[in-house]
Image (cartoon, rainbow, N blue to C red):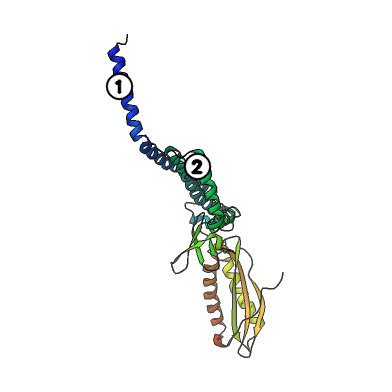
């Protein structure tokens, strides 16, 4: 049986706890809310990362690729899945941070004694402020979501955004990071992106406008160019990167100094520049074998669009 002294000691202990909570309850509650927000974000981020890694690993396993770079030898759709999944994961991480942060702020305000009516009024004020002063942020947010979910770009894509072009390194809720060929990292607001030129989707085309002397045998040169490109497309090193038969589209322009002949080769998007450099090297060596001395390019103006097909 509990004695009077025991009951009195228990009451005194609870009174001490209540007094301590009255003094330190708010700071402790705020600290717990902050810690809870960090833990919640860590859990959500880990879950998103696990899903993204699972998708990437599954694609690699199906493609029998040891790393993401090796996926360039796999079907293009699989590469797009990896890039798009990583971009969506980046966007969801940022979105989760904003949502959890907003919920934590509301919880902290309630702990500090701000009543519900005040919170509603504050939310209305913030909404009005967002409508007036944060239209750019909302535009960035929505445009970023649409770009990712519509698969306009993904992490690792080579893109042209108008003001900046290069490889996409990060896609966020508000800003997309693009590193150009010189190594400069560009931060582009999503709301300012009005067009996206994506060089990593589907296929690409290498176009070589080759100038030759005016008095050359055109048929012979065209046959030589086509033979050079065809041999390259049949080379085991390029067999899986050149995806269609090379074509000579014919004479692109004629001047007193030279005739320009257009040679085109369709490649995988990721192999465009590498294939172009190799093809130009082979064309140079092949024309040397014909004994052609190329005219000065300073006086040649190439005109003409891709023919309709």
Q: Residues within 10 Å of mark 1 (few under 14, many from 20)?
A: few
Locate the N terminus by quadrant.
Answer: top left
> Residue 177 location in percent, x, y?
48, 60
Find the residue positioned furthest to the bottom: 256
Q: Which mark is residue 12?
A: 1
Q: Is residue 293 visible?
A: no
* 10 Å crowding of disc 2: few (<14), some (14-19), many (20+): few
Residue at 59% across, 75% down: 208
The mark found on residue 92 in the picture is none
Locate residue 79 relative to residue 111 in the image: left or right: right
> What residue is pinned by disc 2?
118
- The residue lying toward the viewer, choosing from 104 and 269, is 104
- Expressed as whole percent of the image width and height from the top left, the position of residue 28 reads 36, 36
Q: Label 1, label 2: how many angstroms apart (C-alpha)?
A: 37 Å
Q: Nearer the viewer, residue 104 or 140?
A: 104
Q: Secondary structure at mark 2?
A: helix
Tell me: residue 58, above or below residue 174: above
Q: Residue at x 53, y 79 (%)?
A: 284
Q: Is residue 148 left or right of residue 97?
A: right
């Amino acid at each position: 049986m509990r004695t009077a002294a025991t009951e009195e000691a228990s009451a005194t202990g609870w009174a001490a706890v209540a007094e301590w909570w009255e003094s330190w309850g708010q700071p402790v509650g705020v600290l717990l809310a902050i810690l809870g927000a960090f833990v919640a974000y860590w859990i959500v981020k880990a879950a998103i990362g696990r899903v993204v890694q699972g998708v990437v690993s599954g694609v690699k396993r199906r493609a029998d690729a040891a790393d993401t770079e090796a996926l360039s030898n796999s079907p293009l759709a699989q590469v797009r899945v990896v890039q798009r999944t990583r971009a969506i994961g980046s966007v969801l991480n940022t979105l989760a941070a904003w949502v959890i942060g907003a919920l934590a702020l509301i919880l902290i305000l309630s702990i500090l004694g701000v009543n519900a009516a005040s919170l509603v009024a504050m939310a209305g004020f913030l909404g009005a402020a967002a409508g007036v002063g944060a239209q750019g942020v909302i535009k960035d947010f929505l445009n970023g979501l649409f770009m990712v979910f519509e698969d306009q770009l993904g992490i690792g894509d080579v893109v042209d955004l108008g003001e900046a072009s290069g490889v996409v390194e990060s896609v966020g809720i508000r800003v997309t990071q693009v590193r150009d060929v010189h190594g400069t990292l560009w931060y582009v607001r999503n709301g300012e992106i009005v067009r996206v030129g994506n060089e990593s989707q589907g296929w690409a085309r290498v176009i070589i406008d080759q100038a030759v002397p005016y008095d050359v045998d055109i048929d012979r040169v065209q046959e030589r160019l086509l033979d050079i490109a065809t041999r390259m497309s049949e080379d085991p090193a390029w067999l899986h990167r050149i995806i269609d038969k090379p074509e000579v589209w014919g004479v692109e322009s004629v001047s007193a100094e030279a005739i320009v002949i257009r040679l085109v080769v369709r490649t995988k998007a990721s192999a465009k520049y590498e294939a172009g450099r190799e093809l130009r090297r082979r064309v140079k060596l092949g024309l040397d074998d014909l004994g052609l001395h190329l005219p000065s390019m300073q006086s040649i103006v190439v005109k003409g669009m891709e023919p309709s097909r």
